[in-house]
Image (cartoon, rainbow, N blue to C red):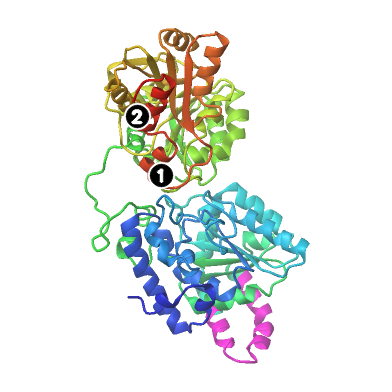
Amino acid sequence: MFHLLDRISCPEDVKKLNIEETHVLAEEIRAFLIDSVSKTGGHLASNLGVVELTIALLRAFDLPEDKIVWDVGHQSYVYKLLTGRRDKFSTLRKYGGLAGFPKTCESEFDCFNTGHSSTSISAALGIAKANILKGSDAHTVAVIGDGALSGGMATEALCDAGNLKKNFIVVLNDNNMSISKSVGGFTKHLTKLRSVPAYFTFKSRIERGLSRFSWGDKIALFLKKFKDLVKHILVGNTVFDDMGFTYFGPVDGHDVEMLTLILNRAKLVRGPVLLHVITKKGKGYKFAEKHPAVYHGVSTFEASVGISSGKRHTTYSRIAGNTLCALAERDNNICVVTAAMSAGTGTDEFAERFSRKFFDVAIAEQHAVTFAAGLAISGLKPFVVIYSSFLQRAYDQILHDVCLQNLNVTFCIDRAGIVGEDGETHHGLFDIAYMSAMPNMTVLAPASFAELEQMMRFAASGAHQGPIAIRYPRGYLQPETKTDVSPFVLGIPHTVRQGKDVCLFCAGLMLTIGEKVCALLKEHGLNPTLVNLRTLFPLNTEFVTHMAKKHKLVVTLEDGVVKGGFGESVAAALAKREVACKCLVKGYAPVVPHGSPKELKKLCRMDERSIAEEILEKLSVER
């Protein structure tokens, strides 16, 4: 089906192609990716944008001796495709199949596990310095996007790398996008560099022409001083020059020949190099080119017609965004802080309607939290809306700048619990544990859209002093029970059904599982009690103790890690009060692989049948 792609099984095969063949290969790769990702889901637009760049990298470097670290790594599909993993692409992001991000256990060509933003330069710099210590001449490359460059960790790494005396290459893949459109100071600087194309076009053409002649390098050296003078007049020094990097670019990121030429030249520089390439996110697929954010991460779709723009499901993210808009209409002190995730967190409408009170701080979660603390201490009511796994990066700021000062900052923690195909770097399994350990922190978990809205309104009301964390899942699944019949009251659980024998304490989305567990237990003659805990911390120990004394077994169900979760707190409270009741604490292990949520729940014995079996075993009931 694919004349050239069928011949590629390793990077050496890419090196054998002539320039004309690389153009054909790029077209075949795009066709393959569109077809494959439309069937599996995954990150499409970002991969379509790095096809030529990936080909050039494989032509210029000797892998796996040389190392390439992909920032975030969701743009590594092309790399996987050309490093021997094409036959496994039908398993992409499925349990037991190819991961959606680089994995060292998957291939010798993956040198570092990634998944979160802004880590590549630090990791690659560590590898480069290790090579120095070992006496190795291998090259190290970090490939980072302009959105990821806004992360503070990337800036720290650039500053450190500026002093390096050995070759070290950072490739800046500039498509003017992260997931949402890039923002921040670096974005403005890159825009300035993009706005002077005449100099760089002239420079590229001269370099391409001179490279064809044996005496070209001597003339190029002679012209270098003149070139630098022209650059200084038209562009001035870049921030990368000032950090100690030799700056090349901007370069057309879809020109394999020029990219290969400049990468080979960059390898000769003694010291750090930054190659600035301009790419188009979604290139080669008209739907993705027009709507790159929509095609950043996709579910399955019909490739010939693109993603349907029909009616969207109501999601927890959308409910959170709508509630924030409603609150802001009545309260001028309501404001929203997010980290380059307005669309993903459902706050894009708020950004349009209340732009003065909306703050997208780019990929800088630490800054987002302390910035929100500054807003709060000045009398405003900030809502920090960030994915659970990304908020982990701001642990110290939550503790030091918000909790110790007992400030009224509300954390809307999206994507809490198992998120599925993106795997262990994206599951939101730790927020209960790390938030509950904080002084003055209140942790809430809504089990329905109505409860989420009620909790957010409570947080905005001013009736409570101190930080509040509201964790809610990805998607639109709600429990079957009508939890909204009982208005939310801080610290007061809702008893959904009263029974005996066994009491299930559930939180958030686990109430859905709890309902199904109760149905299975009833088939075995048991009459279970089901409680929607709602307020996880501070735990209502009096209520928990009271309920435990009425039952033979207490079961806690939470979509977070067991260690540090509310289940351990329930067990500790019962032990402290010497309640003669068995206790079964159910939660997740710290590391859960990628796969569908249904598969992962079964794997971790967090599905209703596995939980029911353990309960019956605990109670020694015949099955």
Q: Label 2: state its secondary structure.
A: helix
Residue 232 appears in the rendering:
yes
Q: Quadrant of residue 575?
A: top right
Which residue position is annotated with label 1?
Answer: 420
Q: Report the span colored magenta.
A: 204-232
Q: Is residue 255 above or below residue 41?
A: below
Q: Name the amino acid, label 1.
A: Gly
Q: Which dot marks residue 551? A: none
Q: Would you say residue 317 sits in the magenta stretch?
A: no
Q: Measuring 28% from the left and 37% from the top, which residue is drawn there?
A: 314
The x, y position of residue 447, in whole percent, is: 35, 26
Q: Which dot marks residue 513? A: 2
Q: Is residue 46 above or below residue 582?
A: below
Q: Name the amino acid, label 2.
A: Ile
Within 10 Å of disc 2 (Cα), the crowding (few <14, some 14-19, many 20+) is many
Q: Nearer the viewer, mark 1 or mark 2?
A: 2
Q: Measuring 41% from the left and 53% from the top, which residue is drawn there?
A: 93
Residue 289 appears in the rendering:
no
